[in-house]
Amino acid sequence: AARAAGERPVLDGAWLPDDALVASIGSTLPAQRELDVAALERCALLVADDPPEVLGNSGDGLAAAAAGVDLAARTRSLHELVAGALGAGARGPGVRVFKSVGSALQDLAVARGVLERALRLGLAVPTPVQLPKKER
């Protein structure tokens, strides 16, 4: 989750061991970069929360495509991973990358889960909040 000055990548693919797992969540827009092209070129599997968005609209995906790196064949959705649909391919050799561009729905689902657990454990106290209706 790094934002580099000048939107230059902060992770050099040459630094990665052959079995590295990279979680990239800091660059979500076309002008933002987190991973260099070499990191994505070495990627055996790219798991994305939103594959079309990661490949076609994130700076990392766009830079890889411009350099001729075909990530589409190596990209699977987070849903496929969680559902167990990747089989042995998710555990094979090579660099693995999780790339997230974020989703408000995901954020809300995680926040709800955290709140529910905190309430169960007595770590949070419900606060009655009522927002006034906005007249249109």
Image (cartoon, grey):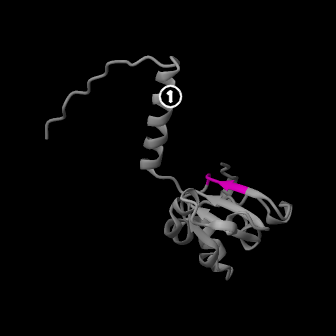
| Residue 25 covered by magenta stretch | yes
On the question of residue 13 being in view, the answer is yes
Numbered disc 1: secondary structure: helix
Residue 77 in percent (x, y) is at 54, 64
On the question of residue 10 being in view, the answer is no
Q: In the displayed image of the protein, which residue is found farthest to the bottom?
A: 68
Q: Which residues are magenta?
A: 22-26
The image quadrant of residue 42 is bottom right
Q: Residue at x 51, y 32 (%)?
A: 114
Residue 72 in percent (x, y) is at 59, 76
The image quadrant of residue 27 is bottom right
Mark 1 neighbour class, 10 Å CA radius: few under 14, some 14 to 19, many 20 or more: few
The image quadrant of residue 31 is bottom right
Q: Residue at x 65, y 48 (%)?
A: 1
Disc 1 residue type (three-letter): Arg
Q: Main secondary structure of the magenta part?
A: strand
| Residue 11 covered by magenta stretch | no
Q: Is residue 60 left or right of residue 44?
A: left
Which residue is nearer to you in this view: 127 or 80? 80
Q: Which residue is mark 1?
A: 117
Q: Quadrant of the C terminus?
A: top left
Q: Residue at x 57, y 65 (%)?
A: 85
Residue 101 in percent (x, y) is at 54, 57
